[in-house]
Image (spheres, rainbow, N blue to C red):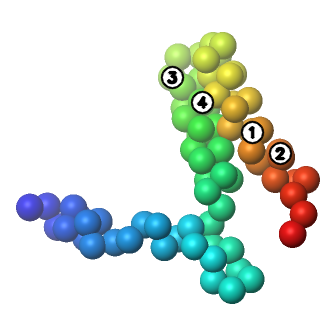
Amino acid sequence: MNPLLILLSKMDITEIFKTKGNLKRWSAKRTIGGVIVLTACSTILDTGVSWEAVTMCIIGIIPISLSFFEKN
């Protein structure tokens, strides 16, 4: 078996989304939004601007934009 797969199987990826006191490690909504926008940008570079890529950018930006209005 590939050593990289063995290493990945032993890692608990959910730990990076958990909080540590008042310090938040990663925010899932910002991470997912970033992944969607990154995918849209990659699609635009490969195939040019399309309505699908623009829609993915808008969907990816919405959670990041709405997070500015959150109150603790």
Q: Earlier in the sequence, mark 2 or mark 4?
A: 4
Q: Nearer the viewer, mark 1 or mark 4?
A: 1
Please tell me the numbered disc located at residue 61.
1
Q: Nearer the viewer, mark 2 or mark 4?
A: 2
Please tell me the numbered disc located at residue 65.
2
Check the image and report above or below for 45 versus 4: above
Cα gap from disc 2 to disc 3, whole angstroms: 26 Å
Q: Amino acid at mark 2?
A: Ser
Q: Amino acid at mark 3?
A: Asp
Q: Nearer the viewer, mark 1 or mark 3?
A: 1
Mark 4 falls on what kind of element?
Answer: helix
Pick the front one: 34 or 48: 34
Q: Which residue is mark 4?
A: 40
Q: Amino acid at mark 4?
A: Ala
Seen from this angle, which residue lies furthest left? 1
Cα gap from disc 1 to disc 3, whole angstroms: 21 Å
Q: Give how far across and how far down residue 40 sits, in percent.
A: 60, 30
User: For the residue carrying disc 3, how many other residues have a C-alpha within 10 Å: few (<14), some (14-19), or many (20+)?
Assistant: few
Tag 1 near tag 3, CB within 8 Å: no
Tag 2 near tag 1, CB within 8 Å: yes
